[in-house]
Amino acid sequence: MRIKVLLLLLLVSTISACEKSFNIPIPEEANRPVLNLLMNKDSVMIARVSLSVRLNEYGPKEVKDAVVKLYEDGNYKETLTTYTESGRTYYRGNTLAKAGATYRVSADVAGYEEISGSDKIPDTVAIEGIKMSVTRIDAWRNRAAVTVQLHDDPAIQNYYRIRMYQLLRVPNGAGDTISLKLPQYFESGDATVPILDDDTHPEFFTTDALFNGRNPVFVFRADVFENFNTMIVEISSLTYHSYNYLNSISLAEEKDEDGLSEKVIVYNNIIKGFGIVGGVAQRQYELRK
């Protein structure tokens, strides 16, 4: 027994003697320029510029004096101007984003190399049909089922996002009626495949990898208020860049609520910086009960 103990101690000391220390350089990700701009078809460009922070710091550091330039199909278009809203600084242009055009946006931040990103503006999604049915669950709740049929273009890779909002009209203290647009959590599935779980989400992402060139049908189910009357369905066509950015943001927020989940790396397409320049084409449909 003593011999075994001595052999074990000798092995431990041998392993310890062989240990080596390695210094692995970790790149500094704080204080790097960040450019964020989602370009919506037929809308003006509104960008945000900031500096990244460390994980133990709160919120980005605003950059209020950047020079932000816009290029359309390789040609200089304009320099975005600053304005402040709710205490935040934004950079706004006058150019309306055109479907099919490619835009590059650059930002010069004092003390840093120029950063930039580019993307193409997609066209709005073509749909074959959209409808809603509402059933009563109890005295306080209804269940809304929204059916959406997309018309997928087989010539290109397509990326989609769908969101829903309850539109409530309620009286205020002055006797007037005001409209409230409330984000709606919902279950997602298609008309032929039953929903496999009860998880609800505020947005639904998909590509046409499994239905390229066909007209898929999706069904979204949501519990709504008893006085519910109108649902707004927002259907967005995305590019590769905007799809990966928005989907990774959604996954990161979802995983952040679960401390045991693997963290998600947010997609980035900014050269020499962080953030996103991505194209989006949104269309909203108002469905009444």
Image (cartoon, rainbow, N blue to C red):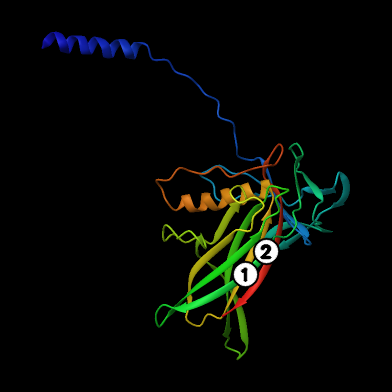
Question: Which three-letter amino acid code belongs to the residue tagged 2?
Answer: Ile
Q: How many marks?
A: 2
* Distance between the alpha carbons at the discs numbered 2 and 1: 8 Å
Tell me, yes or no, if residue 68 can be seen here: no
Q: Position of residue 76 (x, y in %)?
A: 88, 47
Tell me, yes or no, if residue 258 can be seen here: yes
x 62%, y 89%: residue: 176
- Estimate how packed mark 1 is, as few (under 14), some (14 to 19) or many (20 or more) residues with alpha carbons within 10 Å: some
Kindly indicate whether the residue at mark 1 contacts the one at mark 2 (C-beta within 8 angstroms). Answer: yes
| Mark 1 lies on residue | 130
Which label is found at residue 127?
2
Judge whether 168 appears above or below 2 on screen: below
Q: Position of residue 131 (x, y in %)?
A: 59, 72
Local secondary structure at mark 1: strand
Question: Which three-letter amino acid code belongs to the residue tagged 1?
Answer: Ile
Judge whether 69 appears above or below 147 on screen: above
Nearer to us in this view, 133 or 201? 133
Q: Position of residue 285 (x, y in %)?
A: 66, 71
Where residue 9 sits, quadrant-wise, is: top left
Judge whether 208 appears above or below 1 on screen: below
Q: Is residue 207 left or right of residue 142?
A: right
Residue farthest to the bottom?
175
x 75%, y 36%: residue: 113
Judge whether 175 appears above or below 267 on screen: below
Q: Position of residue 150 (x, y in %)?
A: 64, 61
Where residue 169 sits, quadrant-wise, is: bottom right
Q: Is residue 272 left or right of residue 225?
A: right
If the image is split into quadrants, where does the C terminus sit? bottom right
- Estimate how packed mark 2 is, as few (under 14), some (14 to 19) or many (20 or more) residues with alpha carbons within 10 Å: some
Local secondary structure at mark 2: strand
